[in-house]
Image: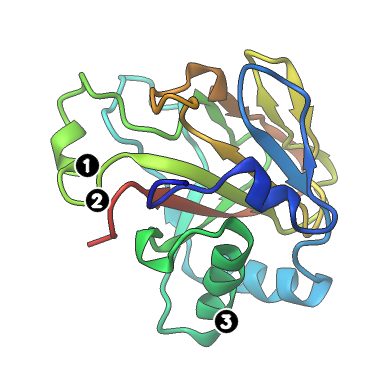
Amino acid sequence: MKAPGESSTDILLAHPGVKRFPSSRLDLFVLRDFLSGEECETLCAMIETQHRPSTIANYNGDDAFRTSSTCDLYRDDPIVAALADKLAALSGIDIAHAEPLQGQRYAVGQEFKAHTDYFEPNNADFEKYCSVAGQRTWTFMIYLNDVEAGGATRFKVIDKLIQPERGKLVAWNNRRADGSLNAATLHHAMKVRKGFKYVITQWYRERPWG
């Protein structure tokens, strides 16, 4: 039986079109056409009107580590609420464990260098980010547009490169089967070389959000 805040291979593969990347190092899944072109265009427009410079937890001194823009998306908007519900139906995770959806916008030359989505327990800001809802469990990310050049997501440990494609969803478990944090989820949002890249990310937590 899965723990609260967790999805599973069985749950995800029960949905038509979900493919699992063949690796013993991490649980990584891809689903094309999760969102329609119209849904993607609407979300891109929302991000374009509300984005702000991205930040990182536990600043590492590298001002070029994450150069994208971020847009917080809340469930009081019916479009955002519908997407959050659609992701919860796919993941099998109670919506109470979901962080607010976040949009990301990458212009030419912007990137997010290799990182993991979980919070490092030994870092100074761990309690700040995890004291209420706990650690991040699963990540569900959706590409909202076809990027003219660049913008791939590279999982460095398994040397897997995922190209941005409108409506494509990528999901992974940030932990191993024993519940320990999985460093093999290290991934790099590579530089956009031409055009823009728009992404939506849903993170889930161990305990209910807020």
Query: For numbered disc 2, what is the local secondary structure?
Result: loop
Point out residue 48 in the picture as x, y percentages from the top left corner.
58, 66
Q: Which mark is residue 130?
A: 1
Dots 2, 1 in contact, CB < 8 A? yes
Q: Position of residue 46 (x, y in %)?
A: 57, 73
* Residue at left offset 83%, top offset 58%: 16
Q: Which residue is mark 2?
A: 133
Nearer-N-terminus badge (3/1): 3
96 sits to left or right of 11: left
The answer for how far apart the CA atoms under marks 2 and 1 are is 6 Å
> What amino acid is found at the position of numbered circle 2 in the picture?
Ala
Q: Amino acid at mark 1?
A: Cys
Q: Quadrant of the C terminus?
A: bottom left
Q: Amino acid at mark 3?
A: Ile
Residue under the image location 83 percent in, 61 percent down: 33
Q: Secondary structure at mark 1?
A: helix
Return the residue nearer the eye: 160 or 148: 160
Lower sequence index among marks 3 and 2 = 3
The answer to which of 46 and 162 lies nearer the viewer is 162
Q: Residue 22: horizontal and vertical position, in percent? A: 78, 24
Q: Is residue 175 above or below residue 35?
A: above
Marks 3/2: CA–CA distance: 25 Å
Residue in the foreground of this view, choosing between 81 and 70:
81
Q: Which residue does the image show at 63% across and 71% down from the upper left?
A: 43
